[in-house]
Image: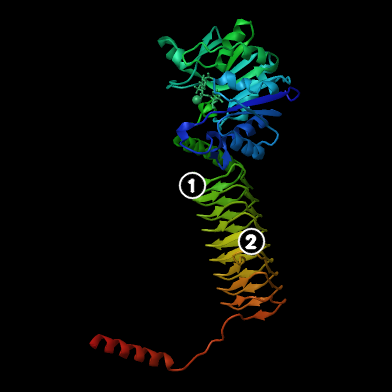
Amino acid sequence: MSQRTCLSVILAAGEGTRMKSAVPKVLHPIAGLPMVAHVVKAAEAAGSGDLALVIGHGADEMRKATQKFAPKAETFVQDKRLGTAHAVLAARDAISKGYDDILVMFGDTPLIDPEVLSAARLKLAGGAAVVVVGFRTSNPSGYGRLIEKGGKLIAIREEKDCTDEEKKITFCNGGLMAVAGKHALQLLDQVGNDNAKGEYYLTDIVEIAGGQGFDVVAAEAGFENVLGINNRAELAAAEGIWQARRRREAMLSGVSLIAPETVFFSYDTEIGADTIVEPNVWFGPGVTIATGARIHAFSHIEGATIASNCDVGPFARLRPGADLKQRAKVGNFCEVKQATVEEGAKVNHLTYIGDARVGAGANIGAGTITCNYDGYSKFFTDIGEGAFVGSNSSLVAPVTIGKGGYVASGSVITESVPDDALAFGRARQRTLPGKGKELRERFAAAAAARKKG
Ligand code: UD1
Ligand code: MG
């Protein structure tokens, strides 16, 4: 199979009006990745070396997005949407380069399993000219029906062109097809538009290929694989299915999820075995967690690297560039951004660490703030190994706290603190014996006088 060349043609020219969005439908994300990029990933996983994306609506935006998730894909514009066969032919230049296998997919079916694509390719390798991925449903309305005869697929009939008898068929076209590259163009070129919608139907190649004596087969797949997204309710449903799959995969790979249905992964989240994720945790893109970490409840984590045996949360926020080394702790109501928290360092309560390094074994007291921004630029705070920063301190960057440095609570530190030094950055305390009582009596008398007057 690996020797066979493969082009995937992904149709994404539709407007997706039912999304009611300024953003092209296929760019709406599932698990943080545009739905069409999920299709691209599946195609790549099934060994499709080359990709052709057929775009139309929002072409500029589509091209820009494609650069990010599929920089090697070629884009083709379908100016007028005259049907799925017409859309595939927009990629004629790519198809005519000559491939063993052509996969045709819709950009709005993000849950396609690469195994289904591989299975379809295998049937091409076995000599089929056209492979149609079908699914069974008790509610076939709106789908093209697969018409079989003697175990052979002889036609796909669109709902609008079906007889009442054909409408009863529950084996439907999922929209996904595999076509032998050497026949693809001649089959597509024969498709006409003499049907109820006046469109060039890709599905017509089934009958055309059969008429030429080619082998045409259906491959059955689970409904999820071909689930198309047309509105935001379906988008949320697909997200739910994706998350359920990913949670199961995480658990089977050794990650404990105490309440799996409350944990949300990103398309690229990586978590090592023996990590425990408590309820209500959100992973944005770019998170890598090694083994044995504990992510406590209600943490929000994106763009972060978490080494083994770290302890995060509850209610922690790790933002892009947060880099926690082994056994680091970031506790409740702490935010870490673009900062390294080195081995065994503790940032336990109510703290902001941004554009900083917290040295190994350092202890950051409750309410510490790295003041990294002056309204114009960002500055770095370097906290040395084993340093101790007392509670409620402001470290005004750029500033360095040396190795073993000690910052008194409530300090505003504007000058660097050398190794092993003790720094106070606060007003000296004055204590006046008896003055508390005197003050209270004075205030009470003043209040009484006001009441009388
Ligand atoms: C299509 C199939 C139908 C199948 C169903 C599964 C055809 C003729 N019908 O019907 O058998 O059961 O999908 O969901 O193929 N597109 C373009 N350009 C066009 C037309 C469509 O890019 O000119 C894209 C759309 O954006 C969409 C996809 O192709 O992503 C499918 O088009 P759609 O109009 O949704 O086809 P269906 O009527 O749903
Ligand atoms: Mg559709």
**What amino acid is at disc 2?**
Ala
Which residue: 50% across, 15% down?
A: 198
Residue at the image position 28 percent from the left and 86 percent from the top: 450
What is the CA distance from the residue labelled 2 to the residue labelled 1?
25 Å
Question: Which quadrant of the rendered structure holds the N terminus?
Answer: top right
Residue found at x 70% / y 15%: 182
> Local crowd at mark 2 within 10 Å, few (<14), some, or many (≥20)?
many
In this view, the residue farthest toward the front is 79
Locate residue 170 relative to residue 329 in the image: left or right.
left
Taking 22 as reference, is 92 left or right?
Answer: right
Question: Of residues 46 and 72, which is closer to you in this image?
Answer: 72
Q: Are marks 2 and 1 in contact (CB under 8 Å)?
A: no
Q: Can you give x and y, in whole percent of width and height, for residue 105 in the image?
A: 59, 25
Question: In the displayed structure, does residue 21 sit left or right of residue 272?
Answer: left
Residue beneath the point at 54% across and 20% down = 82
Q: Which mark is residue 262?
A: 1
Q: Where is residue 390 in the image (x, y as percent from the top left)?
A: 59, 75
State which quadrant residue 268 falls in.
top right
Q: Upstream in the sequence, badge 2 or badge 1?
A: 1
| Image location of residue 102, percent across then percent down | 66, 21
State how the image is colored. Answer: rainbow
Mark 1 residue crowding within 10 angstroms, few (<14) / some (14–19) / many (20+): some
Can residue 47 be seen at all in this image of the molecule? no
Q: Mark 2 points at which residue?
A: 328
Residue 207 higher or lower than 231, as above or below: above
Name the secondary structure under disc 1.
helix
Residue 26 appears anywhere in the view = yes
